[in-house]
Image (cartoon, helix red, strand yellow):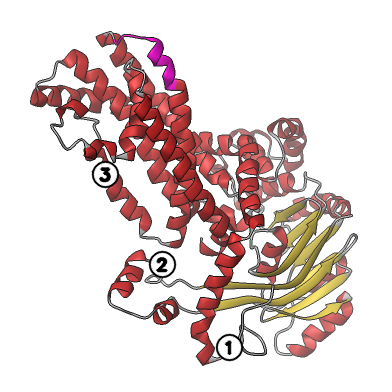
Amino acid sequence: MAHIRLHNVHISFPLYEVAGRSLKKRLIEGSTGGRIGNSQDSGGTVVQALEGVSAQFEHGDRVALIGHNGAGKTTLLRVLAGIYEPALGTVDVQGQIAPLFDIGLGMNPEATGYDNILLRGLYLGLSKREMRKRAPAIAEFTELGDFLDLPMRTYSLGMRMRLGFAVCTEIDPDILLLDEGLSAGDASFVKKADARLREFWDKAAVIVLASHSETMIRNLCNKAILIEHGRVVCTGTVESVLERYKADSSSVALEP
Amino acid sequence: MKPASPQQGHPYAEHPSRRQTQRGFWAMQQIRQGLHATNLHKALADLGAGLRQVELWSTMGMQEIGDRYRRSIIGPFWLSLSLGVMVLGLGLLYAGIFGQSIDDYLPYVAAGFTVWGLISGLVLEGSRSFIDAERLIRQLPGPLSLHIYRVVWTNFIVFAHNIWVFIVVALIFGVQLSWGTLAVIPGLLLLLLNGVWIGLLLGLISARFRDVPQIIASVTQLAFFMTPIIWKPDMLSGRTFVLGANPFYHLLEIVRGPLLGQAPAPEQWLAVGLITVGGWSLTLVFFSVYRWRLAYWV
């Protein structure tokens, strides 16, 4: 059974200012007799992005991460993905994770559409052979036709999104991590994409979605976690967490 | 693991007097975490998992080379062409300056430049490997060694183009093939194996300290002149420690020697063996301790 369990996770980012990153500064400080305490302090502040976050994502959970900009949603998603390993706390992952934070990730504007289908597939962890097998179906779904033989820089934004969407929904991971959902391009395509998206979502055992869109959260999720300033404020049903979020931030409402 | 906070309460509480200890606390925490035995396992697992993603890094490498020369007619063979021009020009000039016979000196320079191109590419691009892959590292979980293998692979492809310059020169000037020539295969493999640790170590340090790539660039430039590439070891009278202590010389010689038909001396293999073992040991320690911090640095 796929799951992710976080226990007391702390994530902090040291902020290296331009000077703090330079070896020269370190050396000069050392030679001018600055105390270690001082020179460490001069490196700047530590941004505490997550503080003591504990959460469980179990089989069948569709969890929405709710919070203001900068509350720590994206950082939490990256922890779930295994990109940031916490300095304190434990992360227990069971199952194959697919983070789809950026569907255009790793795409090469100079390469053709077909090349990018292959490349994006490799990034998602599929093999070349598998991608060659799936490429015709992906190509057909995008409706891009002969454009797939042209470099991707000739594509419009919508066409690129179609391509990214088509490749990314081709995989079937256990755990799906999304930042602001998947956009599929223009209106006519969205209809077609909806069915595929539903099927894609149903396949995943666990979904974690960071979003500001209330409709999306209500339609898609069965649980929610409210994060403020890097801490989990409350966990529960979508309804109760949304209510709490609105109560806390009466001035800032969610998008309808 | 309990936070090493002397006081009760939260170790990260924003309190002005505790600001200073915070950095120290995190530094200690990093090292303690890093030296834990599981981290060595994770580092080794990273290297293994990266290697298994051969399809990804080879495709990335190929595309990178393709991008550099897209829409140019002879494509990557510009690499060979510019090297050829340089070898010819410099070879003729310095053969005159040093009073060397061209038959002997031109193949020597061609081999030297070809192999040096590989070494300096591994060092320079290796040190930028993680910085250049910043976006991928923050979006894509997976082995970090992937980015190093990509650099090594890209440089190997460049080498495979450059080697034709040497082959042409060798054919024209009749470089003798011998059994020693076969040593080029283990020599090259050993050089690439060293390229992996060099990239990992320099890449990690450079991601944290952004001046380091600049330092490395100037050191590499100096090393080009300190290493016998346009001059020959036997031109040195005395001061041979300059050669013995130069790791670039040993790494260069185990590939150049065989190319010119001479198997490297046992001391040469030994020196490279020591560089390999020493470099990898140091890198494994660094990689174990700081591998998990890299995503925070880029």
Residue range corresponding to the magenta coloring: B175-184
Q: Which mark is residue B221?
A: 3
Q: Amino acid at mark 3?
A: Gln
Q: Quadrant of residue B71?
A: top left
* Mark number displayed over residue B14: 1
Residue A179 versus residue B86: which sits nearer the camera?
B86
Residue A220 visible somewhere in the drawing: no
Predominant SS of the magenta segment: helix
Asked whether the residues under the numbered discs 3 and 2 touch, taking CB atoms below 8 Å apart as contact, a structural biologist would say no
- Do discs 3 and 1 share a chain? yes
Residues flagged by tags 1 and 2 on a common chain? no
The residue at the point 33 percent across, 37 percent down is B248
**Disc number for residue A21:** 2
* Quadrant assignment, res A93: bottom right
Q: Residues within 10 Å of mark 2 (few under 14, many from 20)?
A: many
* Mark 1 crowdedness (10 Å alpha carbons): few <14, some 14-19, many ≥20: few
Which amino acid is tagged 2?
Answer: Arg
Q: Which amino acid type is marked by label 1?
A: Glu
Chain of the residue under label 2: A
